[in-house]
Amino acid sequence: MNTQLVNEQHNASLEVQRHVCVLDDMGLHARPAARLAQEAQKFASDIHLVAGRQEVDAKSILDILTLAVGSGATLTLRARGEDAREAVDHLERLFRNKFQDG
């Protein structure tokens, strides 16, 4: 088997997850949910957001809104794919910055 192919298969199955906290006083409402979905769509990896037993596609604003997450909630951000680490790093920064640039 080609070494490059092995590396590509390994990278495609890379899964990264991290806990993030909702810092916005209004929770994960429409505006931050839209920003999260928009930013998640920039990555090739499958990206999910987990709240309790509910797991949703982080690339879908409607899915994110179904979580009805309030301020102070801790969520799990999970990505699987070739750019999973970059995706989680980027999206975690969004949560830390309350979905503002910076």
Image (cartoon, rainbow, N blue to C red):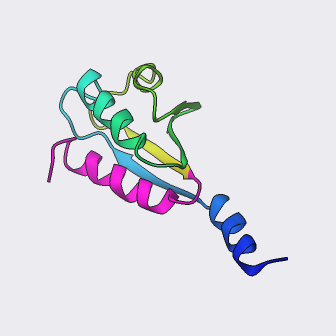
Please state the total of marks drawn on the protein image: 0
Residue shown at the point (20%, 35%) measured from the top left:
24
x, y percent for residue 4: 70, 76
Q: In this view, does 39 lie to the left or right of 4?
A: left
Residue shown at the point (45%, 49%) measured from the top left:
43
x, y percent for residue 3: 74, 80
Q: In which quarter of the image is residue 33?
A: top left
Q: In this view, does 47 lie to the left or right of 95?
A: right
The residue at the far bottom in this view is 3
Residue shown at the point (29%, 38%) measured from the top left:
72
Quarter of the figure that contains the N terminus:
bottom right
Q: Is residue 56 left or right of residue 42?
A: right
Q: Quadrant of residue 65?
A: top left
Residue shown at the point (34%, 42%) measured from the top left:
39
Residue 4 in the image: above or below residue 102: below
The residue at the far right in this view is 1
Residue 43 in the image: above or below residue 69: below
Q: Nearer the viewer, residue 82 or 22?
A: 82
What stretch of residues is rendered in magenta? 80-102
Quarter of the figure that contains the C terminus:
bottom left
- The reply to whether the magenta stretch includes residue 42 is no
- The reply to whether the magenta stretch includes residue 84 is yes
Residue 90 in the image: above or below residue 57: below
x, y percent for residue 26: 20, 26
